[in-house]
Amino acid sequence: MDIATLIGLVGALSMILGAIMMGGDLAAFINIPSVVIVLGGTIMCTLTMQRLPVVIGAIKVAINAFIYHLDPPEELIDRIVGLAVKARKDGMLALEREQIDYPFLHKGIQMAIDGSTPETIKAVLSTEMVSLRQRHERGHTIFKFMEGTAPAMGLIGTLVGLVQMLRTMSDPSTIGPAMAVALLTTFYGAVLAFVVCGPIAKKLENRTDEETTLMRITLSGVMAMVSGENPRSIREQLISFLSPDLRPAPEESE
Amino acid sequence: MDIATLIGLVGALSMILGAIMMGGDLAAFINIPSVVIVLGGTIMCTLTMQRLPVVIGAIKVAINAFIYHLDPPEELIDRIVGLAVKARKDGMLALEREQIDYPFLHKGIQMAIDGSTPETIKAVLSTEMVSLRQRHERGHTIFKFMEGTAPAMGLIGTLVGLVQMLRTMSDPSTIGPAMAVALLTTFYGAVLAFVVCGPIAKKLENRTDEETTLMRITLSGVMAMVSGENPRSIREQLISFLSPDLRPAPEESE
Amino acid sequence: MDIATLIGLVGALSMILGAIMMGGDLAAFINIPSVVIVLGGTIMCTLTMQRLPVVIGAIKVAINAFIYHLDPPEELIDRIVGLAVKARKDGMLALEREQIDYPFLHKGIQMAIDGSTPETIKAVLSTEMVSLRQRHERGHTIFKFMEGTAPAMGLIGTLVGLVQMLRTMSDPSTIGPAMAVALLTTFYGAVLAFVVCGPIAKKLENRTDEETTLMRITLSGVMAMVSGENPRSIREQLISFLSPDLRPAPEESE
Amino acid sequence: MDIATLIGLVGALSMILGAIMMGGDLAAFINIPSVVIVLGGTIMCTLTMQRLPVVIGAIKVAINAFIYHLDPPEELIDRIVGLAVKARKDGMLALEREQIDYPFLHKGIQMAIDGSTPETIKAVLSTEMVSLRQRHERGHTIFKFMEGTAPAMGLIGTLVGLVQMLRTMSDPSTIGPAMAVALLTTFYGAVLAFVVCGPIAKKLENRTDEETTLMRITLSGVMAMVSGENPRSIREQLISFLSPDLRPAPEESE
Amino acid sequence: MDIATLIGLVGALSMILGAIMMGGDLAAFINIPSVVIVLGGTIMCTLTMQRLPVVIGAIKVAINAFIYHLDPPEELIDRIVGLAVKARKDGMLALEREQIDYPFLHKGIQMAIDGSTPETIKAVLSTEMVSLRQRHERGHTIFKFMEGTAPAMGLIGTLVGLVQMLRTMSDPSTIGPAMAVALLTTFYGAVLAFVVCGPIAKKLENRTDEETTLMRITLSGVMAMVSGENPRSIREQLISFLSPDLRPAPEESE
């Protein structure tokens, strides 16, 4: 589980909550109609803009991105090189008995065992990669749309409150509290947009980049195994995907 | 009919309406001159920016996008594979008696029956695809322009109201209601932009992507049929366009 | 003359004028110094940013775009096919006696009659196309710059007014009218930007797209004529540029 | 000297100055601390973002762009064609005695005289072109950064003023003048950004485009001369870079 | 150490500090809860959006960028040409005894000494270059995200303050100070975004460009040395990366 994301999300909300509680009671910041207009309105606009199954799919992708941990690329490289060593010694078919957790690597190895041509393996794995990027892309788009829509719903709610307040401004003492309520939708819209949806949209983007890197490493590794390169040369090719501080000292491995 | 779009649009407007009615009477939010300046002004600016037939065409495209349901890609693939099976058994001409509802697929099959060369079929179908994207593109552009123009017209209307109010500020008790009326155009502009035009523009974009995917699947399928590939291989190629959860278990089909 | 553009521009300004007149006398909205600071300032900044001849050229392009009507593409296709029929019957030289109104088509046909090679014709016509796009591009850039600068000049004018008003706030009764005058520059800036310059910039963009389409059709048509294709095949190629509803029923023409 | 730029810059500032003087004395708009926070702050942030020599280089490029006049492209074409005529009559070496003012053309001709291969000439001149674009690009980036930073510094200054004013709001009569001073930084920021830095950034962009066009014409011309094309053909190629109204009547020159 | 960056950062903050101190005591601008909500909230949102090790890596890259000075490209060219002269005289192996400070150049030379093929050297060095750009890219993204998030947190903090103030507006004399405190978060957000994060993000971008140029020069130089070009020709190729004013007079060196 990607604990930093949770810490970030909960931490930011706690700080805002803390600032509210320091200045008085929390109740003043809870207003059900304002929640409905901002949260409900944002969800409704999202439904207008994208079909329901796609929205649900995007939320699933987001939740998976937070719960399931990606293996670090250096471990994946070790695993691929290990498989390459075994395949070189005992033949490709010996990999059949291996337990491979990463489904994308499993599919590639399975195709290699089944004797698919390198072209077919490359085509199928590339399609999987593009397909994953497209599904994630839809996720970004939806959370980015919500990031843009939430403040707009906040503005609309505040305008409704302002117009109602301004029409009946007979008693000056009521102006302050009415204005406070009117501002609550702007507040909700800003929190929803900038603390929740925006960072999540960015998170999904970063996650997609990481997952694509893993897939690229896997694709390169499987292709190199199929064309029978020796394990040391495979490792050298694959560590070029890593940043220098993650690589084992390159001079020695030479 | 794409019911979610309607639910989203009606739902968002209902929530805003609900917030208005909770705070008093609806009448305070209806002001014909404000409607004219925001809605009329936005339409007029749209006419300045694009010829009338194109605007009407864009609206038609939008309405069609909401009314006509797109078949899911997995059904289209089943249909194409079914046709490929039949063509393999009884020959291409046997497809003449088939009832094909999707016009783009119908056109491709018809050309194949008529004996057009693969190059011609590909060229004609690709042109259709580009032409569809261009027409939809114009639709997005118009709704995006309206999304940008509506708040500007709202601002202009509010400035007119503010200037009129500020000039005759002799009686303080009239300031509130005058200000409320001035803010109404901002409110109308925000609703028109962020609840109506923005989500519709995005919806058209998403719809175009879906329709393009269907066309790409059809194009690949027809080309594969014409070059005489076997139905199972066609299916394998086409399901690569689907996201994994929509695909029939790939291991078994192998 | 592109009447819709004029209707749009005049219509939007009339609606704003109507809203002003409904709320009192028009005189309150006329303030010469404010006009000078917004309109004059925007023009001056435009001169800073681009040489005078280019600015004048851009305005000429814009005026031409509004006055001269573009022939619809389907008429251009009929014309080209007509010429192709004649050229096939009586030879290319027979086109010398034809009256061709569209200069771009005229130039292409003339080069074909003069016996230029297809490569030369293609190079010269392509250069013309790129050159037209560049000149129009400069036009968009200038009007887009004005769209961005006008509200900024409005803001500057309003700030000047606010500072002057705030310094001498001894008599509260003068605050309202002074503030009203200060807001006028914001109002002028918004109208100039969002009702005039923005839609015109977009209009030029759309116009460029239409003109480029005509040029592409012409280029394809002339190239096809020069390589001696038969008229029916030329028509089939050219109508692929049209959207389906503008095409003559394709099945029959086959 | 590009007089229009100066007129634009001085004209815009004069109009703002005029608006200030019409409404009272200029002194109210001069506030040294506000100037320091906006102008100084913007310069400091620019130093944070780019090394000093590059900033100074960008300012030099900008000043050169305003002082030195670019020859119009039609004169450059005449010059190149004239050189081509001479080279054809008396040989390439005869150009050694020619006085060539435009350094880029001079370098190209000199290399041709020295007997460099066409590939070398093309490579060296292209590198010069890319290098010029990169240096100008840095200039745009710096002025665009200042255009974005100046209003931010204005906002920060105004916030400082507002907080100070609000804390000591005991005497209402001081609110107005204090607020006026607070708004001055916003005013300075807007003028610096939208009247000075923004148009200059755009000017440099336009200038780069013009200079690149001159370089492209020169490159084409020198390459054509080196490969021994006849002067009339060289002219025909080069005028394709001009817009139609700048070209000598093309039919006659044929 | 890049002293200008430090001067810029400290200078801008000092000017703001100066403006605060001129208008009264500094204490009024220090409010711990406001610091927590803006700085803490921004950091928390950054954690939501990117994994902790990547954030720490980005900060390390930024610090390195400020501390370590890049050698100017002209010195690097001199060094490479010097090595090329030595290699031509005494053979490639003679370079083994050379002390080479720039790691990227050292790696390239070492590979050349070890007898790697030109293709391998190019592939490995190119991968290093792409890897460096990607890591720097992540740094920009994080600082740009913070630049966008800090004002949003400032807005949220101000909204919290406003709502609290408006609810208890019984005593007018408390409005001013409460409002002042509410505005502090906006002030903190603006300073954090526009004085700190924005310029640093841009600085990293500029730094990446400079470092990439050094790497490109090195790559070209090493490749030229490996293919045995003479030192004068290597110098000529490499100075094409410099802007004209940094090049030694090119005519003479010819």
Image (cartoon, coloured by chain):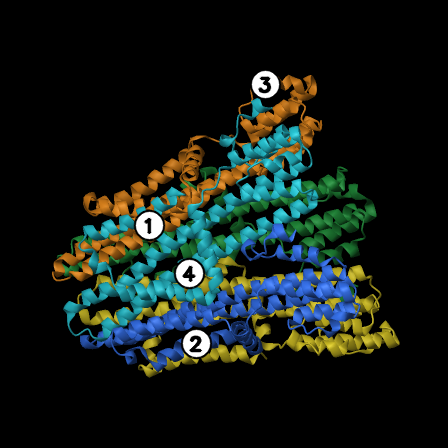
Chain colours: A blue, B yellow, C green, D orange, E cyan
Per the image, label 2 sits on a secondary structure element best described as helix
Q: B91 left or right of B205?
A: right
Among numbered discs 3 and 1, the one appearing first in the sequence: 3
Same-subunit check for callouts 2 and 1: no
Q: Mark 4 — residue?
A: C12
Circles 1 and 4: CB atoms closer than 8 Å: no
User: Label 1: which residue?
Assistant: D190
Task: Decide: few, some or many residues near mark 4? Use Cα within 10 Å; few <14, some 14-19, many ≥20.
Answer: many
Pair 4/3: label in front = 3
Mark number displayed over residue E33 = none
The label nearer to you, 1 versus 4, is 1
Q: Amino acid at mark 4?
A: Ala
Q: Are marks 1 and 4 on the same chain?
A: no
Q: Nearer the viewer, residue A249 or C103?
A: A249
Mark 3 lies on a secondary structure that is loop
Q: Which mark is residue D98?
A: 3
Q: Classify 10 Å Cα crowding around label 3: few (below 14), some (14-19), many (20 and above).
A: few
Give the residue type that dot 3 points to: Glu
Q: Amino acid at mark 2?
A: Gly
Which numbered marker is on residue A41? Answer: 2
Where is D219 relative to A230, above or below?
above
Q: In the image, are marks 3 and 1 on the same chain?
A: yes
